[in-house]
């Protein structure tokens, strides 16, 4: 089984999971960890959460808000110190990525496959009318 940790600054992780629950229904295989206080308290909470998940799940996917930020750096540190290949780290998360992963968890597909599809979906959902060269209106 695969577990997903959504990790980020302030309440973004909690908010994305809440929005995902609203759209796709609650999923028990997901946890959020929010950097709202000091870095040492956050690291302790992150490590405790990931340690507990590693006991419950064969593989973990950790989504973070931005590369180079404290949540990403500490998740990467955890991967190097404790999880190795049992943890897949994805950064630059958005709501479509979270939804795609949550909906795919019960499929019994490999974590790497789920991550690849979720990231492709998340990227495809980004639209910028300033740089998009299209003759048609975007699909809504």
Image: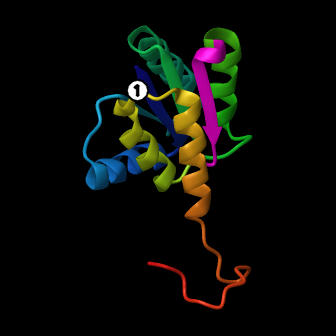
Disc 1 on helix, strand or loop?
A: loop
Image spot of residue 116 (x, y percent) = 60, 41
Give the labeled residue for mark 1.
108
Quadrant placement of the N terminus: top left
Image quadrant where residue 67 sits: top right
In the picture, measured across the screen, residue 87 lies left or right of residue 95, that is right
Q: Say above or below: 113 vs 136.
A: above
Q: Nearer the viewer, residue 84 or 76?
A: 84
Identity of the residue drawn at 55% across and 45% down: 117
Image spot of residue 63 (x, y percent) = 55, 38
Image spot of residue 58 (x, y percent) = 47, 13
Identity of the residue drawn at 69% across and 41% down: 69
Magenta segment, which residues?
A: 84-92
In the picture, measured across the screen, residue 129 lies left or right of residue 16, that is right
Q: Say above or below: 119 vs 137.
A: above
How would you rate the neighbour count of disc 1 (Cα within 10 Å): few for under 14, some for 14-19, many for 20 or more? few
Magenta span contains residue 91: yes
């Amino acid at each position: 089984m695969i577990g997903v940790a959504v990790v980020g600054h302030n309440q973004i992780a909690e908010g994305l999971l809440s929005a995902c629950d609203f759209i796709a229904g609650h999923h028990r295989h997901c946890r959020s960890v929010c950097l709202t206080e000091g870095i040492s308290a956050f690291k302790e909470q992150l490590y405790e959460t990931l340690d507990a998940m590693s006991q419950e799940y064969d593989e973990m996917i950790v989504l973070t808000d931005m590369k180079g930020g404290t949540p990403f750096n500490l998740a990467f540190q955890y991967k190097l110190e404790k999880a190795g290949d049992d943890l897949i780290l994805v950064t630059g998360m958005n709501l479509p990525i979270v939804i795609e992963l949550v909906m795919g968890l019960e499929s019994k597909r490999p974590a790497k496959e789920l991550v690849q599809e979720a990231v492709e979906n998340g990227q495809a959902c980004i639209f910028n009318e300033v740089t998009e060269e299209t003759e048609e209106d975007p699909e809504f």
